[in-house]
Image: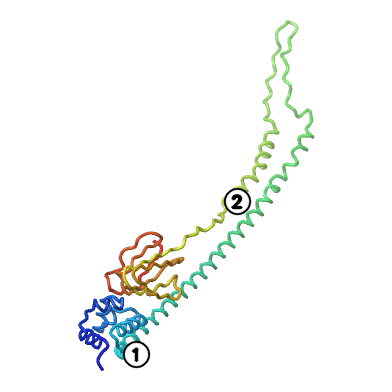
Amino acid sequence: MESIGDFFRHVRETKGLTLDDVASKTRIHSEFLMALEEGNYARLPDQVFAKGFVRSYARSMGLDEEDAMRRFAECAGSFYNKQSELELLRVRQVADERQRQANRKVIFAAAAMAVLALILLLGREQSTMTRHRPAVDAGPMTDVPHVQSERKPSDSVPVRRGPERTEAGSPAATEPKPQEAAPMLGAPTVSREASLSLPTVFAAPLAGLPGQTEPAQSGALVLDLEALELSWVVVQIDGASPHETLMRSGDRVQWKASNRFTLTLGNAGGIRGSLNGKQLESFGPRGQVARDIVLKRP
């Protein structure tokens, strides 16, 4: 049986039409029509869009659409079956990677909880030591007032008297000055001041314990796409199921994501986009299929 591409080209040339004429009728890019006639299915969009192109082409030529679909299934069936297998493999790889990321998050959360529990335990023990330490150090100081009250007058510092005079009026030999003893109350006073300052010294490390900070909240990613020409678009948001749409010239769409977008474009040069208001570079030349374009936070 004649291939679908040769069949379409033969009918088109018989009617004296060019690819641009068919493109104006079907509103399908002429490069897609050329790829369909040449049997270059790799340049066509996914199978669901390619089938739509075949129906539109057959309808514009006045051909039987069902017959055209049968020809297309026989010619392109093996190609799209292989593509389906590759897509299934890619989906499994994405699912495995998602599972590995989930496992890493669980391990990280468990480690964070263990560290937090250790910090709380250390803080509780240090707080307990701070409450009991001043009472132990200050206990012996309660005997100081009792020692001072039992001092005898004979233990006080001797009073210094003036020189005695003899009968002749000359001053008598003075006795040597007794060596002045250091006040005995000085040491206890210093010790009490030191013991009273202990609560402040031991309480200081508590101020150095790490505090909790609120995590910074990041904004969402906003993707705006504008169709300059007819193109099919497949977008995957944060690893969710992909969305497919056919955009015509002048159409605008907007998606929001938390982390990233993954795009597949049937006509890379026919789509213009911006991420969070910042214009993106060209996705590729006109008519070329661009796959697995990842857009994420810089």
Front in this rendered view, residue 273 or 219: 273
Q: Quadrant of residue 296?
A: bottom left
- Give the vertical position of 118 relative to 63 (above or below): above
Instruction: Where is residue 237? Give x, y as percent.
Output: 44, 70
Disc on res. 199: none
Q: How is the image coloured?
A: rainbow
> In this rendering, would 129 be left or right of 252?
right
Residue carrying label 2: 206
Query: Mark 1 belongs to which amino acid?
Result: Glu
Q: CA distance from mark 2 to mark 1?
A: 81 Å
Q: Residues within 10 Å of mark 2 (few under 14, many from 20)?
A: few
- Give the vertical position of 96 relative to 254 (above or below): below
Q: Which residue occupies the extreme bottom position in the image?
A: 1
Front in this rendered view, residue 63 or 66: 63
Q: Quadrant of residue 79?
A: bottom left
> In this rendering, would 100 be left or right of 191?
left
Quadrant in the picture for the N terminus: bottom left
Q: Earlier in the sequence, mark 2 or mark 1?
A: 1
Tell how many labels.
2
Query: Mark 2 belongs to which amino acid?
Result: Leu
Residue carrying label 1: 66
Q: Residue at x 69, y 30 (%)?
A: 183
- Give the vertical position of 205 relative to 238 (above or below): above
Instruction: Where is residue 225? Give x, y as percent.
Output: 37, 66
Instruction: Where is residue 151? Give x, y as percent.
Output: 78, 33
Mark toward the viewer: 2 or 1: 1
- Give the vertical position of 45 relative to 271 (above or below): below
Tell me the element at label 2: helix
Front in this rendered view, residue 89 or 161: 89
Front in this rendered view, residue 102 or 94: 94
Q: Residue at x 69, y 16 (%)?
A: 174
